[in-house]
Image (cartoon, rainbow, N blue to C red):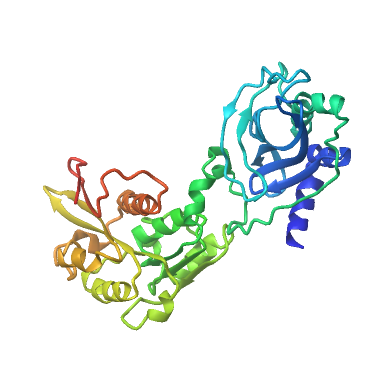
Amino acid sequence: MKWLSVFHQLVSHNEDIERLIQKGYAVSFDSSYLIIRDIPYLNEKKELLVGAIVAKLDFVDKVHVRPVDHQIFFCGSHPCQLNGSLISNMGGGPATLALSSDDLVVQRSFSNKPAAGFANFFDTIESYVAIISGPPMELHNANPFTFRITEVMTDSVFHYNDTLTGRAEIGDLSMKLKEDIIAIIGLGGTGSYLLDFITKIPVKEIRGFDLDSFHVHNAFRSPGKLTVEELGKRKSEVYQGRYEGFRKNINLSSKFIVADSREDLEGVTFAFVCVDKGSSRTEIFDLLIAMKIPFIDVGMGLSRDNGLINGMLRMTFYDIDQAQEVLAKKLAPMVDLPDDVYQNNIQISELNALNACLAIIKYKQIRGFYTDDNTYYHMLLSLNDFHLAGE
């Protein structure tokens, strides 16, 4: 079984965790957390209860882990001493944490660091268990050493554990994005940066579409390093090779999205349109609106003033219910502009990245990851004064 392989990989490569198992602790893993179940403790009535200790894992690589810090989380109420009073000197306080385990609910955190600190997970768990489980072990002859192994199946889209989300304790927010199937239409400058950002988000699937080839000038306005072998290949092939080692369910196709591309977009829950030709938008917009797929369109309007580049970056959101109304406002150019300097492939990677940032932040606001006090569906950022205007 896959989970057993992951479990044994971590145990076999981390001596401190192996020692926990050998001693009899109920060890399991939940994404980027170490879980120790079957931890006995007393409540204020001196009754025997059972909780669990949760500690953050810092993945050094795929198989080696270390503690993030000396703190732990606890699934249970505040443990008490033999006389029924709360155990003191535990620090921390009420806390919540998103876990995949249905039977575990984090209620608080504890911070009890010895002068010398903790060298590893074995020392950390031993210290906290002595404090938490000492009283019930004496009063009820309770025992935390159950030798029970319970592994949580986490169907992660990443090939590496997302320790960033665990460290930041924002798993509950990331869960809001996991069911999305994202389409990126156009993998040019802005589209390639959007792809880079979205690969780090736990969405269910990423689909990308671009028929163009990858040349040297593309490397100067896209993320990542350039290898000679990539030149001349399709953009979709280049980026597929770069990112498929990072995550699963990334499917980039060498094709344009046109009016009869409905099959390519079946199941998509959100799309980003990153094309630099206004004439290409008409078919794409009509198809997305007909399929009731919400989408964000990005673009730039650049010109040279006194020899310098000036202009605007744009982000426009088309919701399912208001797409036709927003479309009627003609906020996105639907024809090709003859004097648009952007068409000449000026190397402006920082503007591509910034345009992608506006789009990805808006998407996360829509999904409830970031706060959104203004609910703008259209934003323009002027380069000359960095003024952001919204509608």
Q: Quadrant of residue 115?
A: top right
Determine the residue located farthest toward the bottom in the rendered image: 260
Left or right: where does residue 164 sit relative to residue 305? right
Q: 322 or 341, which lies in front?
A: 322
Q: 114 or 26, which lies in front?
A: 26
Residue at horizontal 73 percent and vertical 61 percent from the top: 2
Left or right: where does residue 312 sit relative to residue 230? left
- Quadrant location of the N terminus in the rendered image: bottom right
Q: Position of residue 239 (x, y in %)?
A: 48, 64
Q: 275 or 226, which lies in front?
A: 275
**Image vertical order of residue 131 relative to residue 170, above or below:** above
Q: 138 or 109, which lies in front?
A: 138
Residue at horizontal 72 percent and vertical 44 percent from the top: 64
Q: Position of residue 96 (x, y in %)?
A: 56, 38
**Image vertical order of residue 378 relative to residue 214, above or below:** above
Determine the residue located farthest toward the left in the rendered image: 306
Residue at horizontal 12 percent and vertical 49 percent from the top: 305
**Image vertical order of residue 294 relative to residue 388, above or below:** below
Residue at horizontal 87 percent and vertical 37 percent from the top: 23
Q: Position of residue 203 (x, y in %)?
A: 50, 59
Q: Quadrant of residue 297?
A: bottom left
How many numbered circles are shown? 0
Q: Position of residue 109 (x, y in %)?
A: 62, 30
Q: Quadrant of residue 56?
A: top right
Left or right: where does residue 234 sit relative to residue 103? left
